[in-house]
Image (cartoon, helix red, strand yellow):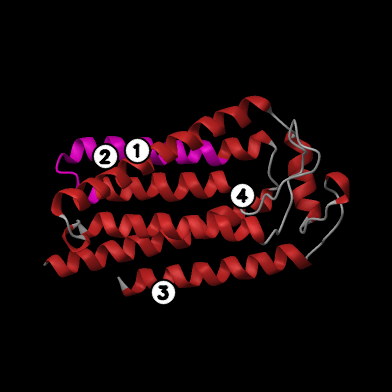
Amino acid sequence: MKKKMIIAAALAVLFVLFIILVKTVDVAAIGPNGTEVGFSWLNGAVSGAFGYNGFFYKLTQILGYLSIVIGLVFAEEGIEQLIRRKSLKAVDREIIVTGILYVLTAIVYLFFEVVKVNYRPVIMPGDTAPEASFPSSHTVLACVILVGAAIFVLRYLANKKLARILAAAFVSTAAITVIGRVLAGVHWFTDIIGGLIVSAALIVGYAAALDRVDSRKK
C-alpha cells in the first residue's frame, strides 16, 4: 500500500512537472487563432499526421458517455446503500473510496476548465474559438472510471471468470478511447500524455486506498 502511495505521489509530481514543460519547452503559435503550444514540433507533427476525423471524434464521444454510465452505476449503488442503511458509515468502504476517486477526478476537470494550459488544435464546428484541451478529459474519464472499474471487479466480484471478462472489456474500451482521441485530431499529443499521467496518479492512489480497505477488513 505504501509503495503504491509513493508511486501515486511521484506521478502527481510528474504531472506538475509535465505542465511546466508544456508551458516552457519549444513553445510556438501553431494553433488556430495563433494559440501557442509547447513541444510544438512534436505536437505539430502528430496533429499534421492525423488532422480532424469526425468518425473517431463521435466514437470517443459515445465511449465517453459509456464511461459516465458505468460511473453512475457505482454512484447509484452507493446512494442505494446510504438510503437503505441510513448511515454513511454503513456504506461499503470500497464504494466510498470509489466515490472519492470520482470527486477527485471532477476536481481535476474543473481546475483545468479554469486554468487553461492548451487550446485545441482545431476549432470545433459551431464554435468561433478553440476550447481548452489539457489534459484530455475523455482520456481521464475513460482511464479513471473504466480502469478503476476493472480493478474493482477483479478484487470484489465473486465470479472471477466474469470479473476477468468485464475487466478486459473495461480496459479495452479505455484503450480504444485514448487511441481514438489521438486519431480524432481534437487534442494535441501532449494533452493525451497529460491525461494519461494524471489518470495513472489517480488510479494508483485508488488501488492503494482499496489495499487499505482490505487490510482493515483482515
Q: Quadrant of residue 115?
A: bottom right
Disc 4 marks a residue whose amino acid type is Ile
**Residue plotted at (32% across, 47% down):** 75
Is disc 2 in contact with disc 3, using a CB cutoff of under 8 Å?
Answer: no
Question: Which label was assigned to residue 164?
Answer: 2
Q: Is residue 172 magenta?
A: yes
Q: Quadrant of the C terminus?
A: bottom left
Magenta stretch in the rendered image: 154-178
| Image marks 4 and 1: residues in contact by CB distance under 8 Å | no
Q: Of label 1 and label 3, which has the lower sequence position?
A: 3
Question: Which element type, helix, strand or loop, lies under badge 3?
Answer: helix
Which residue is under mark 1? Answer: 168
* Residue 149 or residue 130, whichever sits in front: 130
Mark 4 — residue? 192
Q: Nearer the viewer, mark 2 or mark 4?
A: 4
Helix, strand or loop at disc 2?
helix
Q: Residue, x 55% and y 42% (percent of image)?
A: 178
Q: Earlier in the sequence, mark 2 or mark 4?
A: 2
Give the Cα separation between the discs numbered 2 and 3.
27 Å
- Outermost residue, top side: 55
